[in-house]
Image (tube, rainbow, N blue to C red):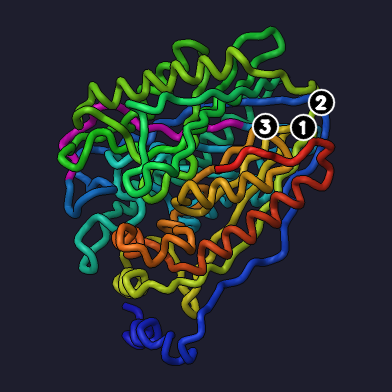
């Protein structure tokens, strides 16, 4: 067991620092991949459905699953242009710590350059606890270590299979607006929500579908806190609907859904989750109907910014002391994370290592060198809520403050995001984005 002095250091840090605010630090930018050439793409899907009986992530504590309603997957998309390769893996999970992503990267060995893997979580609230918060804090974690190791292996396996399946591909990009009613809304601030759905379509050389990435911002929690059955929530129905239209693999990447963009379900049922998923599949079809093809030999650039995030939340320190957060290391009141960026032709993807609020998402998009811009929420990490500075003291965000690393984390992620976007724009010949909140 760790020395009890660690806990005292956590509790006394503000005093020892003279109440100074630790803003964390960003390391030098790392250009992970950069190339131009004929586009090749590959995709794969690996099951990650847990056995019944484990703790579910999200909502209340000690919520044990009774069984499986629908399966969970790690869905992978590999992209290659010239010598540049990256892989995106979207998992039907509440989230993953950065340490899990690093272990999945290590398992890939020489198949992919270090840092070229992006892992996102859909943030379903009906999947297993892979963070550690939903057992009985601070007494024990809700994570099943064997299952977590299986997930990390499945991520690496899905990525490897997608790389092995690389073939010539064509890229199309489209966007459409989701309906104002019946899909999502912001429970805290009704006027702050991004209803843009982005569809990224990969087709084979003969025009047949290969993969479809769908980006939209919304908490997958239509089933509510009384559900005890394992499910991908609306994401399962969304991916199934897209794959029915376009055979292949569909991936869902969440956006700026923090504080608190959630589902607008009429009732907390599987039928409502399916309705919302089907409705978003229809919006995806609309986006693809107006999609624009990208040049056959686009440029691909991948850049990452290593972070040391300052943690100013005593609850995180207590969770660390009690060993509730698997693989999460704290040193001097900081924890490692990263911001990850990709540019493929005009498409820009930027990760946020947690649950960014829409306002932060719009600020980052305003710096994008081109459109479409997609903010990959819970990308390579789940630090908690990334609240905007102007929201921090407002009473309506009382809950979000309890599961946030602290106010300085948002500023650090914003600064790192700006730096990554500036590097991605270096070779851009397109005008900056003009869409804003």
Do the numbered discs 1 and 3 sit on residues whose CB atoms are within 8 Å?
yes
Do the numbered discs 2 and 3 sit on residues whose CB atoms are within 8 Å?
no
Do the numbered discs 2 and 1 sit on residues whose CB atoms are within 8 Å?
yes
Left or right of residue 43: residue 205: right
The residue at 72%/34% (across/down) is: 344
Asked which quadrant contains residue 6, the reply is bottom left
> Would residue 326 be counted in the magenta stretch?
no
The residue at 81%/33% (across/down) is: 82
Residue pointed to by mark 2: 297
SS class, disc 1: strand
Q: Quarter of the image containing the C terminus?
A: top right
Residue at the limit of the structure toward the front, as seen here = 191
Q: Which residues are magenta?
A: 64-77
In the picture, the disc for residue 81 is 1
Identify the mark nearer the N-term, 2 or 1: 1
Mark whose residue sits in front, 2 or 3: 2
**Residue 3 makes an appearance in the image:** no
Identify the mark nearer the N-term, 2 or 3: 3
In front of the other: 24 or 367: 367
- Where is residue 390 drawn, in percent x and y? 46, 62
SS class, disc 3: strand
> Would residue 68 be counted in the magenta stretch?
yes
- Local packing at callout 1 (Cα closer than 10 Å; few below 14, some 14-19, many 20+) is many
SS class, disc 2: loop
Residue pointed to by mark 3: 79
């Amino acid at each position: 067991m760790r020395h009890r002095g660690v806990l005292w250091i956590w509790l006394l840090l503000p005093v020892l620092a003279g109440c100074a605010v630790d803003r964390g630090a960003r390391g030098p930018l790392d250009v992970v991949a950069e190339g131009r050439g004929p586009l090749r793409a590959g995709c794969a899907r690996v099951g990650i459905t847990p056995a019944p009986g484990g703790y579910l992530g999200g909502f209340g504590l000690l919520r044990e699953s009774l069984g499986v309603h629908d399966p969970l997957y790690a869905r992978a998309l590999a992209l290659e242009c010239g010598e540049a390769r990256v892989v995106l893996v979207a998992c039907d999970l509440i989230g993953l710590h950065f340490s899990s992503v690093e272990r999945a990267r290590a398992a890939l060995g020489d198949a992919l350059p270090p840092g070229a893997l992006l892992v996102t979580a859909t943030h379903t609230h009906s999947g297993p606890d892979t963070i550690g918060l939903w057992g009985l804090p601070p007494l024990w974690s809700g994570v099943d270590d064997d299952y977590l190791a299986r997930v990390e292996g499945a991520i690496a396996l899905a990525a490897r299979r997608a790389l092995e399946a690389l073939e010539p591909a064509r890229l199309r990009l489209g966007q459409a607006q989701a309906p104002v009613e019946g899909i999502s809304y912001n429970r805290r601030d009704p006027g702050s929500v991004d209803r843009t759905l982005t569809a990224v379509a990969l087709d084979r050389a003969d025009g047949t579908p290969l993969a479809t990435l769908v980006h939209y911002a919304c908490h997958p929690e239509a089933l509510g806190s009384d559900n005890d059955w394992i499910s991908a929530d609306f994401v399962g129905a969304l991916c199934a609907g897209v794959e029915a239209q376009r055979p292949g693999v569909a991936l869902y990447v969440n956006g700026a859904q923090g504080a608190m963009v959630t589902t607008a379900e009429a009732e907390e049922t599987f039928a409502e989750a399916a309705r919302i998923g089907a409705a978003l599949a229809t919006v995806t079809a609309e986006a693809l109907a107006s999609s624009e093809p990208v040049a056959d030999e686009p440029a691909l650039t991948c850049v990452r910014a290593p972070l040391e995030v300052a943690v100013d939340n005593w609850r995180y320190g207590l969770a660390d002391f009690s060993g509730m957060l698997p693989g999460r290391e704290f040193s001097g009141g900081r924890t490692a994370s990263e911001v990850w960026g990709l540019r493929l032709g005009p498409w820009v993807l930027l990760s946020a290592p947690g649950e960014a609020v829409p306002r932060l998402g719009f600020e980052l998009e305003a710096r994008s060198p081109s459109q479409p811009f997609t903010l990959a929420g819970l990308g390579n990490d789940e630090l908690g809520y990334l609240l905007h500075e102007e929201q921090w003291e407002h009473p309506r965000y009382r809950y979000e403050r309890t599961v946030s690393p602290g106010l300085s984390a948002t500023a650090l992620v914003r600064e790192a995001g700006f730096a990554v976007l500036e590097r991605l724009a270096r070779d851009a010949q397109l005008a900056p984005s003009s869409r804003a909140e």
